[in-house]
């Protein structure tokens, strides 16, 4: 899932997280090192923009 859009030298960049829905709970797994926990539930704050679906 793409979050945190920004422009760098005229090129668009996104921060990517992995969205998981399991056991009735939806979370985003974020690799950002500054977070206390890499499991995020604050979807209103991170403002997801779009996603690429992965199926198995």
Image (cartoon, helix red, strand yellow):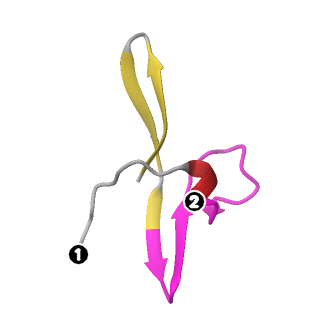
Quadrant holding the N terminus: bottom left
Q: Residue shown at 64%/59% (left/top)?
A: 38
Badge 1: residue crowd in 10 Å (few <14, some 14–19, many ≥20) = few
Check the image and report above or below for 18 versus 33. below
Label whose residue precedes the other's in the sequence (2 or 1): 2
Q: At 38% across and 25% down in the image, what residue appears?
A: 12
28 to 33, vertically: above or below: below
Give yes or no for residue 1 being in the magenta stretch: no
Q: Residue at x 28, y 55 (%)?
A: 52
Q: Residue 53: percent from the left, percent from the top?
A: 27, 62
Q: Which residue is mark 1?
A: 56
Name the image quarter holding residue 11. top left
Q: Which residues are magenta?
A: 20-42
* Foreground pick, 21 / 34: 21
Q: Is residue 24 magenta?
A: yes
* Secondary structure type for disc 2: helix
Query: Closest to the observer: 39 or 45?
Result: 45
Residue 37: image location, x then y, percent: 71, 60
Give neighbour class at mark 2: few <14, some 14-19, many 20+ (Cα, 10 Å): few
Q: Observer-nearest residue: 25 or 35? A: 25
The label on residue 43 is 2
Say left or right for 17 vs 11.
Answer: right
Residue at image position (51%, 87%) is: 24
Asked if residue 36 lies left or right of residue 16, the reply is right
Rendering coords of residue 50 (x, y %): 35, 50
The image shows residue 21, relative to residue 48, as above or below, that is below
Which image quarter is the C terminus in?
A: bottom left
């Amino acid at each position: 899932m793409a979050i945190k859009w920004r422009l760098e030298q005229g090129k668009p960049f996104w921060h990517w997280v992995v969205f998981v829905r399991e056991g009735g709970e939806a979370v985003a797994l974020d690799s950002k090192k500054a977070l206390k926990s890499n499991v995020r539930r604050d979807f209103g704050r991170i403002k997801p923009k779009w996603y690429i679906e992965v199926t198995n």
